Amino acid sequence: AQSVTQLDSQVPVFEEAPVELRCNYSSSVSVYLFWYVQYPNQGLQLLLKYLSGSTLVESINGFEAEFNKSQTSFHLRKPSVHISDTAEYFCAVSEGGNEKLTFGTGTRLTIIP
Amino acid sequence: EAGVTQSPTHLIKTRGQQATLRCSPISGHTSVYWYQQALGLGLQFLLWYDEGEERNRGNFPPRFSGRQFPNYSSELNVNALELEDSALYLCASNGGQGWTGELFFGEGSRLTVL
């Protein structure tokens, strides 16, 4: 069965510093991988996704994630964070392309001015 | 275009009572998903409905049930409420044009069980 681990429940980062949010998954078959973001008092929204092809995927607001099959990871990175990036970030996996997303427990990113 | 809408925003019940939560998907979306977001546990998959049928169910007891109506809106019912059912219940919809993993979420219904 698929599962997702986000080891860091909270990550504080200074503004304009780089950040990495870690995500590891467990699955015995091919997977689709996703990062969702939940801004304060808002619903979740898709940030970026890996379905196939290039293992490096990017979002429109400067985040990127790399699918690493050997390490079963899909870490999220941004070279320079802004106050507006304050949110909770959820990694999710869909096993074999089936229509069920399994989410991690989330990482709360706090930006320090 | 309206997004996914959920009602009520907040609901307070006591142990043993029943709660009903409602969800309207984005117009044209035929799939509805329900997730429970309890403190510290992330999002736990509850139910998936498509074209009026239950397609998949998470690891929750039978007192969690639901249905999807002909207009694709959905209802989640929780019977015999327990304190640990207190959580944010999120509904999401999907366009049905092939699975791409993008779910569109509502802002949730917060259920408090006293």
Image (tube, coloured by chain):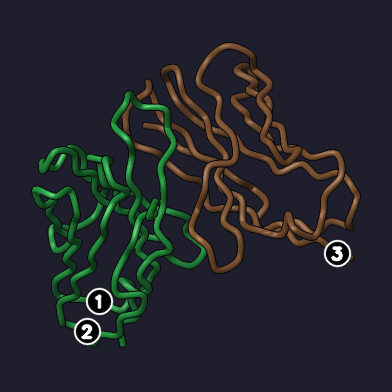
Chain colours: A brown, B green
Label 1–label 2 contact, CB within 8 A: yes
Q: What separation in Å lies between label 1 and label 3 (alpha carbons)?
A: 39 Å
Q: What separation in Å lies between label 1 and label 2 (alpha carbons)?
A: 5 Å
Q: What separation in Å lies between label 2 and label 3 (alpha carbons)?
A: 41 Å
Q: Is residue B90 left or right of residue B52?
A: right
Measured as percent of width and height from the top left, residue B39 is found at 48, 67
* Amino acid type, label 1: Glu
* Amino acid type, label 2: Arg
Q: Is residue B86 left or right of residue B72?
A: right
Label 2–label 3 contact, CB within 8 A: no
Q: Which chain is indicated by disc 3?
A: A
Residue underneath mark 3: A112
Q: Is residue A59 left or right of residue A11?
A: left
Residue underneath mark 1: B82
Mark 2: give few (<14), some (14-19) or many (20+) Cα within 10 Å.
some
Indicate the quadrant where residue B89 lies. bottom left
Which of the labelled discs sits on residue B15, or is there none? 2
Residue depicted at 53% across the width and 52% down the height: A105
